[in-house]
Amino acid sequence: MLGGEAVLREVITDFIGRVTGDVMIGFHFRGVDRSRLIELEFEFARRHLGGQGIYTGRPLHKAHGPHRILGGQFNRRLRILDQTLQDHGVPEEVRRAWLEHNEALREQITQDGKAECND
């Protein structure tokens, strides 16, 4: 797994910093405990990348359901994730699998399907 949990945590911390500071989607994270968000994203990524440990967050549809997350905003998050993974030198096959896994979760997170992200 990417060189261990410390490396994964570094990638996730950078990713969350980029997402929460993003002009298009950062507003979704106002008032969110950033350290808890990092921990949950870390647990989630660790599990789908084959690491040990449990995900302690709520099911995705329950966590994201109350929020109006649009398809374009979901796409923006994927672009930020992709750029973060590239910047950290994550191998292509891992990056592709990570992005495909996130894409497969779209219906649990968005309310309008696969809209375009025009940034």
Image (tube, helix red, strand yellow):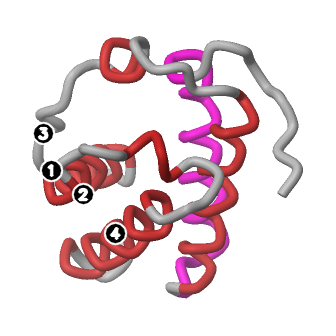
Q: Earlier in the sequence, mark 2 or mark 4?
A: 4
Q: Is 100 colored magenta in this rendering?
A: yes
Disc 3 vs disc 1: which is toward the camera? 1
Q: Position of residue 115 (x, y in %)?
A: 83, 29
Residue named by callout 3: 54
Residue named by callout 4: 1
Q: Taking the image as drawn, is residue 55 in sight?
A: yes
Task: Give the amino acid at mark 4.
Answer: Met
Q: Earlier in the sequence, mark 3 or mark 2?
A: 2
Q: Quadrant of residue 117?
A: top right
How many angstroms separate mark 4 from mark 3 (CA)? 16 Å
Residue named by callout 2: 38
Q: Taking the image as drawn, is residue 51 in sight?
A: no
Magenta-drawn stretch, dominant element (helix, strand or loop): helix
The C terminus is located in which quarter?
bottom right
Task: Give the amino acid at mark 3.
Answer: Ile
Marks 2,4: beta carbons within 8 A: no
Residue at disc 3, secondary structure: loop
Which residue is found at the position 49% from the left and 59% from the top? 19
